[in-house]
Image (spheres, grey):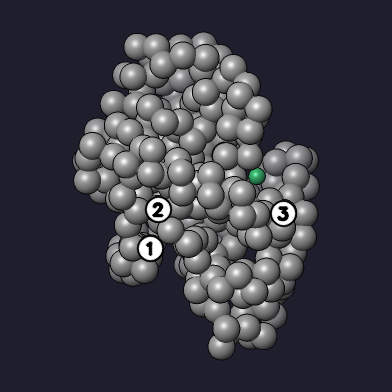
Amino acid sequence: MKLDYTFHSHTFRCAHAIGDIEDYVLLAIKNNFKIYGVSDHVFLPGITQKWTRGNYECLDDYIEKFNISKAKHHNEIEMHLGFECEYSDVFVDCYKYILKEKGIEYLICGQHCGFNLDKSAYGYFGTLEEFFRYKDDIVKAMQSGLFLYIAHPDLYFITATEVTDLYKKLTKEIIDAAIKYDAVLEVNRHGLLRDHHRNNNVYIDYPCEYFWKEVAKTNIKVVVGGDYHDPNEIEDKVLEEQLNAFIEKCHIKISDIKDIYLDYQNKIKRVIK
Ligand SMILES: [Zn+2]
Ligand SMILES: [Zn+2]
């Protein structure tokens, strides 16, 4: 499979990626991409997480730079503007607002942390309770209907050294929820740059073979997310081969992104009403 689309891509604004929208889109065009969706880590009002996301004040510039690139390249590539977001009850209204009023076209869920009602952040993957909190939060994200797809749902393998009963239980519950809510799941290409896949690090990490082999036994819709943090990743042929080998090894069937995006655009209108 030649990856010729993405709905998962970042910019310098999150402070752990480099380049701006135009840098990514130019390389995407050069590499014959059909669709480029930009989805930086969402800017949240009142939240500063310095190496994680830009401040909310970045929003207008982000939209403006996207519009400039889109106007320039509309004959060469289909472009969309979105965000990668953590689900939290406390930010649902904010997400609906940016979708409704700010021209943001889609959201993907990337659950890196959670937020309490007082907007303080909490982490996952320490205690047993925290693992289940991660699972509960992404199930809520699926249920909300706000998201085009769930990015790297198998993130909870970052601290796993073997697939124990805990990981099996979490995997089953996430898969059951994805079936129940007709959620789309993302195989994360960027994850293949992580130490386990490159240097055989002890941690299983994501994308996780066990997880995706289980998904492949179901009819859950699966897409690929580039999750680009550096424009040059678009041209990384080794990574492309690694991705194809992973998909083949896990017997994953990749769904048509155009259908999935169209379905989402119909659904999201009802969700934000
Ligand atoms: Zn990132
Ligand atoms: Zn991302």
Disc ID at residue 230: 3
State the mark number for residue 257. 1
Residue, x 36% and y 68% (percent of image)? 258
Disc number placed over residue 223 in the picture, else none: 2
Q: Is mark 3 within 8 Å of ligand 1?
A: no
Q: Is residue 116 left or right of residue 193?
A: left
User: Within 8 Å of ligand 2, the CB of disc 2?
Assistant: no
Label 3 secondary element? loop
- The residue under the point 50% across, 52% down is 225
Residue 191 at x, y = what percent?
57, 39
Specify the quadrant of the image occupied by residue 249.
top left
Residue 257: image x %, image y %?
Answer: 38, 63
Give the CA separation, mark 1 to mark 3.
23 Å
In contact (CB < 8 Å): disc 2 and disc 1: yes
Q: Amino acid at mark 3?
A: Asp
Q: Amino acid at mark 2?
A: Val
Marks 1 and 3: CB-CB under 8 Å? no
